[in-house]
Image: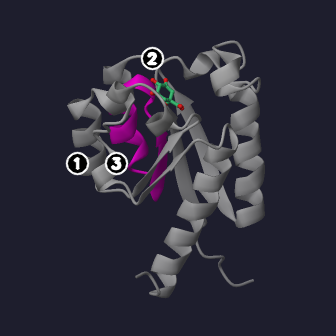
Amino acid sequence: MAAQPEALRIGVVHGPNLNLLGRREPEVYGRGTLAQVDAALVRLGAELGVAVECFQANGEGALVDHVHSAAERVDAFIVNAGAYTHTSIALRDALIGVARPFVEVHVSNVYAREPFRHHSYLADRAVGVVSGFGLNSYLLALRAVAEHLHDDARGVSA
Ligand code: DQA
């Protein structure tokens, strides 16, 4: 049998407090849990033909270390950096440093919230940003990044 081409692999990175999804401000972040989000991502990945691995940490250093090590096996990242979106030059530098494309995700629409959430240290280097679709933001981001990678492979990216 002919060898199958390597499947694309996407690393999902959840930042601080996202382990509390389902319990944390449900009027803002909904009632689904992080485990449900991760399971839905893996299921959609299987439909789209991409492998998905998920990671959550509350500490900035743990997230930076994870980006460094996961970059050796993933083709792209989906990143919800939580509050570090608005504060972390270290996470920005890590994502740029490993030279993997990434999509920035937010469950809430950060632009409809407090002004301090309007600035992102990641957005200008992201392929794109998905914000405000509830937990579906993650699934939309996975579809977008999978298409982006497949388009890249076919050489049809803009
Ligand atoms: C968030 C938005 C951030 O401003 C906030 O600090 C979070 C979650 C979101 O998914 O909507 O922790 O990234």
Q: Which quarter of the picture shows residue 21?
A: top right
The residue stretch that appears in magenta: 64-83
**Label for residue 58?**
2
**Label for residue 140?**
none
| Numbered disc in front, either 2 or 3 | 3
Asked whether the viewer can see residue 17, the reply is: yes
Judging by the rendered image, the residue that carries numbered circle 3 is: 123
**Up-down: is 10 above or below 136?**
below
**Up-down: is 62 above or below 97?**
above
Q: Reading the chain from its start, which is encountered first: label 3 or label 1?
A: 1
Q: Secondary structure at mark 3?
A: helix
Q: Residue at x 51, y 43 (%)?
A: 105
Q: Which quarter of the picture shows residue 51?
A: bottom right
Q: Residue at x 29, y 34 (%)?
A: 91
Residue 116 at x, y percent in the picture: 33, 26
Q: Secondary structure at mark 2?
A: loop
Residue 10 at x, y percent in the picture: 54, 53
| Numbered disc in front, either 3 or 1 | 3
In space, the residues marked 3 and 1 are separated at their CA atoms by 15 Å
Viewer-nearest residue: 68 or 18: 18
Q: Reading the chain from its start, which is encountered first: label 2 or label 3?
A: 2
Amino acid beneath label 2: Asn
In space, the residues marked 2 and 1 are separated at their CA atoms by 21 Å
